[in-house]
Image (cartoon, grey):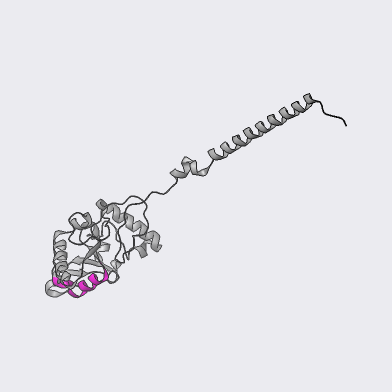
């Protein structure tokens, strides 16, 4: 039988060793490249994460006012959950007309005897914030005409002057619908059971007839408010 020379066998073993080492180097290089391209380690994946937005004011049903398009804070009239008419730190409350706020607090004190609390869902609003609400209402309802049934302009809105407040929850608005006139507090719009304004003459003569919605209110057309 023919036998392979020893020198040839040694050369073959060296070739195998070199090939094995080379393969290990290639595998390690490819693995390192894959790790360096992992999405988990990419800075862009962290940068694209969403950032929490500020608290939004709520309407009388307790829903957030449409969607946020920028920072909102209490200085603009945003109202955190659980704020009452007795709060002394939230501008939406403290910037209300003093006579309106005093009447609300008198009514709330008496209502508390029946276990009812007056929460402020919206009160004073800055003109800039009122403008934003109007833009969002147009987007939500599809037209300026329809939006005007719910949100006034900064020039006409009593909220922007601190002369209106949106009260909740429903038991508070029910109490006010029955007793509010005794304090000069009146619901102004039939479609907004939560919206109250001060009418001092109501104490002796009762609240005036409600408008169907703000578009029927002469103040909204005249620009007096």
Residue 138 colored in magenta in the image = no
Residue 210 coordinates in the image, percent (x, y): 24, 72
- Write down the quadrant of residue 200 in the picture: bottom left
Question: Residue at position x 62%, y 32% from top?
Answer: 25
Residue 170 coordinates in the image, percent (x, y): 27, 71
Q: Quadrant of the C terminus?
A: bottom left
208 vs 197, nearest the viewer: 197
Q: Does 172 sit left or right of 43 as displayed?
A: left
Question: Residue at position x 71%, y 31% from top?
Answer: 16
Residue 174 colored in magenta in the image = yes
- Write down the quadrant of residue 46 in the picture: top left
Q: Quadrant of the N terminus?
A: top right
189 vs 92, nearest the viewer: 92
2 vs 219, nearest the viewer: 2
Question: Residue at position x 37%, y 57% from top?
Answer: 67
For the question of whether residue 9 can be seen, the reply is: yes
Question: Residue at position x 33%, y 55% from top?
Answer: 132
Report the label total. Answer: 0
Q: Does 40 sit left or right of 138 as displayed?
A: right
Residue 214 coordinates in the image, percent (x, y): 28, 66
- Write down the quadrant of residue 33 in the picture: top right
Residue furthest to the top: 7
For the question of whether residue 193 can be seen, the reply is: no
23 vs 53, nearest the viewer: 23
User: Predominant secondary structure in magenta?
Assistant: helix
Q: Does 61 sit left or right of 209 as displayed?
A: right
Residue furthest to the front: 1
In the rendered view, would you say 59 is above or below 23?
below
Chain part drawn in magenta: 168-182
């Amino acid at each position: 039988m023919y036998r392979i020379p020893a020198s040839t066998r040694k050369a073959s073993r060296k070739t195998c060793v070199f090939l094995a080492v080379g393969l290990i180097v290639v595998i390690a290089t490819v693995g390192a490249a894959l790790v360096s391209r992992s999405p988990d380690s990419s800075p862009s994946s962290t940068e694209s994460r969403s950032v929490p937005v500020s608290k939004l004011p709520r309407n009388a049903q307790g829903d957030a006012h449409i969607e946020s398009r920028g920072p909102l804070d209490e200085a603009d009239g945003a109202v955190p959950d659980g704020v009452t008419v007795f709060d002394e730190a939230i501008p939406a409350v403290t910037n209300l007309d003093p006579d309106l706020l005093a009447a609300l607090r008198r009514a709330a004190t008496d209502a508390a005897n029946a276990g009812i609390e007056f929460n402020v869902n919206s009160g004073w609003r800055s003109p800039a914030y009122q403008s934003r609400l109007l833009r969002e209402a147009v987007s939500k309802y599809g037209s300026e005409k329809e939006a005007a049934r719910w949100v006034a302009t900064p020039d006409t809105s009593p909220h922007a002057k601190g002369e209106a407040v949106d009260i909740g929850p429903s038991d508070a608005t029910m109490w006010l619908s029955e007793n509010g006139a005794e304090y000069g507090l009146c619901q102004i719009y039939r479609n907004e059971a939560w919206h109250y304004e001060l009418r001092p003459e109501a104490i002796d003569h009762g609240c005036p007839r409600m408008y169907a919605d703000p578009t029927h209110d002469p103040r909204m057309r005249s620009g007096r408010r």
